[in-house]
Image (cartoon, rainbow, N blue to C red):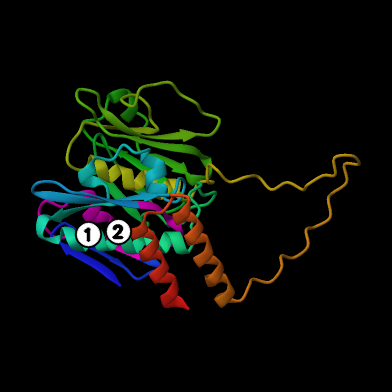
Amino acid sequence: MAEIIQRDGTWTFDGETLRLVPGRDKGVSLLRKTLGELTLPLAALAGIAFEQGKKNGRLRLRLRDGADPLLQATGGKLADASDPYQLTVESDRYGVAEYVVDEVRNALLLEQVPAKGCDSYLLPGPSVPLQVAAGDATVSFDGEHIRLEWNWKTEEAKAAAGTRSIALADIAAVEWQPAIGLENGYLRFTVKNSPTKAPPKYDPNSVELWGFKKDPLMALVAAAVQARLPHPAAAKPALPQDAASGAAAAPALPAAAAEDDHDALLRRLRELGELRQSGVLTDEEFAAAKQAVLKRM
């Protein structure tokens, strides 16, 4: 097991899952503290990297596209401080950070986790019920309905209709945008059969954000809703048709039984050797991966 404990948080890897626990230090962002502990299956990871600095370093995780509803809803717009997949590392723990990187990379290599995107979420998203007060509204989400309660700062044209309730079944999309410079951010719900071009300040399906401390928490609402919407990459089920006759194609035969574990590991060793010879793996990477295979034989 590989583990790194820092004031910013703790990452623990057991070979199958990576557990991320935010730290209690005052510098840890409100979003990370509110989101809490995350457990990432190996299949959700696309890569990991460690960047050294003069005073501190940083561990960074890269998830597969479409694996996490939070990243899907925020579109890479989370600030580094609010990103739950980053960890600040103190200089005296650089060696530990590099060990964690090696362990995760070796596991990804051995398990042959695909780098391609996912067609279903591998993480559940923030738990519900969830309530966040920021910008010009308080937003509540119970898993089935979104409730928008306007405050005294809401534009009159939007607040005149009173508290708004939107059923999840009526939501086509959700979008979160942070405030950048002089441009305000927003949390917007796109309602089916009710398109609007109104700016968030006047849109009754949007919350306007002004760049205050609690604004990132609206990203958790966006992620909780996103997790319950159809996955963007999910294909609609369709019956395969024969090109000539149009008849449904016959079902494919069951796949052959998997090879014996020992034979599969031997084949993996041969593949690693070929990767080293072709220059894909360095001698150090080959030695580490080979050792990991031998431990499983």
How many neighbours does mark 2 have within 10 angstroms: few (below 14), some (14-19), or many (20 or more)?
many
Does the stretch in magenta take in 31?
Answer: yes
Magenta residues, start to end: 18-47
Residue 229 vs 19, above or below: the answer is above
- Going 45% across and 51% down the picture, which residue do you hit? 67
Which residue is more in the foreground, 285 or 52? 285
Which residue is more in the foreground, 10 or 97? 97
- In this image, 23 relative to 45: left or right? left
| Tag 2 secondary structure | helix
| Tag 1 secondary structure | helix
Q: Quadrant of residue 81?
A: top left
Which residue is more in the foreground, 139 or 6? 6
What number is the disc on residue 97?
Answer: 1
Given the image, on which type of amino acid does mark 1 rest? Ala
Which residue is more in the foreground, 262 or 145? 262
- In this image, 261 relative to 41: left or right? right
Given the image, on which type of amino acid does mark 2 rest? Val
- Going 48% across and 45% down the picture, which residue do you hit? 168
- In this image, 166 relative to 206: left or right? right
What number is the disc on residue 101?
Answer: 2
Q: Quadrant of the N terminus?
A: bottom left
Looking at the picture, how far across and down is residue 246, in whole percent? 87, 41
Looking at the picture, how far across and down is residue 50, in whole percent? 25, 51
For the residues labelled 1 and 2, say whether their Cβ atoms are less than 8 Å apart: yes
Q: CA distance from mark 1 to mark 2?
A: 6 Å
